[in-house]
Image (spheres, grey):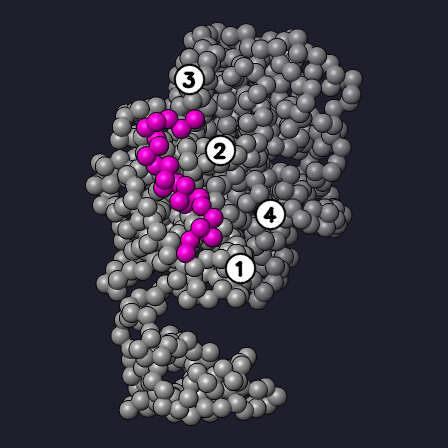
Amino acid sequence: MPREELKEWEKLFAFLKAPLSSLKRVGPKRAATFSRLGISSVGDLLYHLPREYEDRSEPLTISQIKPGKRCFFRCKVWKGGPLTIGRRRVYDVYFHDHTGTVRGRWFNFREEYLKKSLPPGKELLLYGEVTQNSYDGYLEVIHPQWEPVGKEPPLGVLPLYPSVQGLHQLTIREVMKEALKAFPKHREYLPPTLMKREGFLPLGETLWNIHFPRIDQLAAIKAGEAPSIRRLIFEEFFFFQMVLLLKRRARTKLKGIPFKPPGELRKALLESLPFELTEAQLLTLEEIDRDLSGDSPMHRLIQGDVGSGKTVVALLAMVRGVENGYQVAMMAPTEILAEQHAMVLEHLLSPLGVKVELLVSGLPAARKRKVLQGLREGTVPVVVGTHAVIQEGVEFKRLGLVVVDEQHRFGVMQRAALKEKGESPHMLVMTATPIPRTLSLTLYGDLDISVIDQLPKGRKPIKTAIVYEHQRGRMYRFIRSELEKGAQVYMVYPLVEESERLGLRSATAMYSELVKEFAPFKVGLLHGQMSRQEKEEVMLQLKKGEINLLVATTVIEVGIDVPNATVMVIEEAHRFGLSQLHQLRGRVGRGNKPSFCILMAGEKGKLSASARERLKILESTTDGFVIAEKDLELRGPGDYLGTRQSGLPAFKIGDIVRDQKELLKARTWASRIISADPRLRLPEHAGIKAYILYSGLWKQAKTVEAG
Ligand code: ADP
Ligand code: MG
């Protein structure tokens, strides 16, 4: 319901939402052409920004134009006509001025039209990319644009837009100008202090400036430093952050479950741990404990590099829930990981008299029914499971805390779905992929974040090396010598999703090869399509040291924790993202013995330079944050988390990698405004409210949240 005070902005948003055909010079035919570009409203058009600009401020002479450059020059038609070169028909026109000649060439042409438009002696302004013909050495311009002298648009900077066939730049420019001319007067919606501090201009002016800048403004726009382009980037991030923070605030208004202070059970668990918590673990636990005591539900993300010890922190949070008489649940992305967690939890909790149940899809029906019943009746205090936990039919009597491990593997949807299971249970998400700060702001802007930025004492750095196919024999000898020293070894055949079946075959094929290669050592096999019992058996044997070398698929990517394993071989390493390789590498280096990671990169000659550069980063650092930043830089955000499950909002103008500064600034402003005026009641914030309301951002943010 738009309130009275927001009406002021109605006109602006009505204008932006109006169909393109509401503009002068746009009929149904033009509107249809524009719609092929994804432009259907006036707002779509105005936010369709130039991909580059042509500097037509001063025409050159022919002697000044150079091959390889887009040039703008003044000349006269000398002579022209069609001819056949090889089997192609072309139309050549020779142009001249007092300094030289240049040729224009058309491949697809209407002869009559060219003949009529370009008669000898005609004076023109020509524009296009100059090349040097490799056959006769002539300077030429293929399909030049031209304007007759006298009819040319005013000299200056011309925008070049992303376009589709049949939609000319001239048309886009013409319609753009109409839209800009029709831009309504409106009250500024950004707060005056913000406008002033950032040096922003009103929106209408901003858009004029971006579409039709003056020559002296061009450099700043291209560099992303002009107030106009900064405003558009800032605004996009700012409103997104506003919505995230408003949602977060709405959550803090929810009635949570305040836990009593930690008691005996927590103490007993702490005392039974075979190690001291690191400083970073303690700090994170403090933050969690504070949240758990609060009136509103916790919603916290633990970011910590592989091996930083997130599980035990979560477990300490979980026992506090149990102490308070609540049920707690832990979700893992794979069955193997869920089973491992269940084992660890059971090991630590059963001496304290706390029962742990596993709930995965592969469970025998009778057993599953029993667990479900226990959850419903409240007799099962701790459950560990996969997605199965949140699937229909799972009810909790008193769910108090949910821990989601390895968050980046979950769709955002599951996160939302699980929340529905209790009234408003506390929620703790853990991610082992250290997400760069800017990304976590966009992905998890509605969560509080704790960082475990320290590894347990005594860890030896992992030595990493790129190894090529011709060195395989040497690599096998190295593995054998490590096996002889008592080390356990992983050999991973990483699979890309689409070739799951192909990869499976390869892992299996490798298995039989390696059994022979490394006899008499015991070689094991682990992949996602094995039955639950089989997997459990293999994991157990591995933990007990009965398996010396494990051939596996990427099912072991996350969470698997066998401190005696010290060698990780990753086959076809170049096919994978850095963060994923870092995860895999994180399976070793968990004890106090030196560890090794071998990245198999195929034939030496076949590895591309860029792939090599990426693998080199892994050789040079084991810092997950550094790796994540580089990965993001090299692959772009979509790829970084896998577009499908990343839940990354698509920004049209801003780029979370390139425009980090603007993103952080937007975040700062948004949180400043929300903490000063959480309900946006101050008159200077009415415009923000209007923007969120009229632009439909609130709804959009909801779909982002829901996956
Ligand atoms: P991750 O953060 O990758 O999930 P885990 O929780 O699996 O890491 O912990 C990795 C290993 O480190 C486990 O074997 C765990 O028992 C051990 N660990 C956790 N915290 C400490 C600590 N403070 N000191 C020594 N070892 C620890
Ligand atoms: Mg873990």
Q: Earlier in the sequence, mark 3 or mark 1?
A: 1
Q: How far apart are the two marked residues, 4 and 2, measured between alpha carbons?
A: 46 Å
Disc 2 versus disc 3: nearer the observer: 2
* Label disc, if present, on residue 253 of the rendered structure: 3
In the rendered structure, which amino acid carries the disc numbered 4? Val
Residue mark closest to the camera, 4 vs 1:
1
Q: Position of residue 308 (x, y in %)?
A: 47, 32
Residue at x 41%, y 59% (from the top left corner): 175
Does 334 appear above or below 613?
Answer: above
From the viewer's side, name the closer residue of 611 and 189: 189
- Dot 2 or dot 3: first in sequence order is 3
Label 2 CB-ligand 2 distance < 8 A: no
Query: Does the stretch in magenta take in 150?
Result: no
Which mark's residue is nearer the viewer, 2 or 1?
A: 1
Mark closest to the chain's N terminus, 4 or 1: 1
Among numbered discs 2 and 1, the one appearing first in the sequence: 1
Asked if disc 4 and disc 1 are in contact, CB closer than 8 Å, the reply is no
- Name the kind of residue labelled 1 in the image: Lys
Q: Amino acid at mark 3?
A: Lys
Q: Please give the range of residues in magenta.
A: 1-24
Q: What SS does tag 1 mark?
A: helix
The mark nearer the N terminus, 4 or 3, is: 3
Residue pointed to by mark 1: 29
Q: Which mark is residue 699?
A: 2
Amino acid marked by disc 2: Lys
Q: Which residue is mark 4?
A: 569
Look at the numbered discs 2 and 3 and tell me whether their residues touch, using CB distance below 8 Å.
no
Position of 248 compared to 464: left or right?
Answer: left
SS label for mark 3: loop
Q: Secondary structure at mark 4?
A: strand
